[in-house]
Amino acid sequence: MSRARATPSARFDITVLGSADAFCSSGHLNAAYLFETDRSTFLVDCGPTILLAMKQRGIDTALLDFVVVSHLHGDHFGGLPLLLLEYRYERPRERPLLILGPPGVEERLWTLYRALYPDLDGRGLPFPLRFLELTPETTATVADVEIFSVRVPHQIEDTSLALRFDVAGKRVLYSGDSPWIDRFIELANGVDLFLCECTAYATPMGLHVEYPLLRPLVPQLGCRRLVLIHLGREMREHAAEIDVECASEGMVIKL
Ligand SMILES: [Zn+2]
Ligand SMILES: [Zn+2]
């Protein structure tokens, strides 16, 4: 099946706002990626350091049209209550905000919001907040962005998603958090960019990709560009021995 190629003017830029794991390893920030297209500005994951990341780079928080979260671990969605607070007080918002995420995202966000700011519970927000649950093996469309979701074995009961984005003929695969699965080879085939988590270097980190397992598979990946993300402490310490491109804050990838 062929895909329409992008017109030269179509915009699809990705800025790395947070390339670390949950521990802000080696001083890097929690997971967050700013995606900008001709018609959409949105976040992919929203870790607790999101406001720091955006304001350090002079990115206006009001620009966000929607937020997509891959799973409901704190380092990926813990920044959402702070973003809501930002829109309530610091950068008052009136237009709707859409949050897309795995099943349960709405309930879990309100639970977190109430835990962090119980005094604000029940006072509502001055803008419409909408939710769209992402269902594995289906495609959701928001403006000019198509988002295909794949369940990955990072959590047992909750749903963790890898996400594939199609914009104007360009395609990006985002692993979210996941151990390596061979389906990534199929999903990465022909994509313009594969943002692949690689948390662990030598010491296994549980349900995450380990570099010694990933490296021999790289030649099998049919992606045009591979960038490793969600990097743990050992990945940073061994940077000189890693010959695959690694993300860092401020990296801008233009597709
Ligand atoms: Zn994580
Ligand atoms: Zn996780």
Image: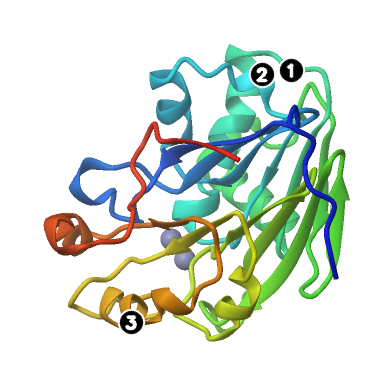
Q: How is the image coloured?
A: rainbow
Image location of residue 241, percent across then percent down: 14, 63
Disc 2 under 8 Å from ligand 1? The reply is: no
For the residue carrying disc 3, how many other residues have a C-alpha within 10 Å: few (<14), some (14-19), or many (20+)? few
The answer to which of marks 2 and 3 sits earlier in the sequence is 2
Q: Amino acid at mark 2?
A: Ala
Label 2, label 1: how far apart the Cα atoms are = 7 Å
**Count of number-bearing discs:** 3
| Apparent side of residue 238 relative to residue 69 in the rendered image (left or right) | left
**Badge 2 vs badge 1, beta-carbon distance below 8 Å:** yes
> Is 210 located above or below residue 24 in the figure?
below
> In the structure shown, which secondary structural element does the residue marked by tag 2 occupy?
helix
Q: Which residue is mark 1?
A: 93
Label 3, label 1: how far apart the Cα atoms are = 48 Å
> Is 89 located above or below residue 173 in the figure?
above
Image location of residue 12, percent across then percent down: 66, 36
> Is 135 located above or below residue 110 in the figure?
below
Residue at (48, 79) in percent of width and height? 220
Tag of residue 62: 2
> In the structure shown, which secondary structural element does the residue marked by tag 1 occupy?
loop
**Badge 3 vs badge 1, beta-carbon distance below 8 Å:** no
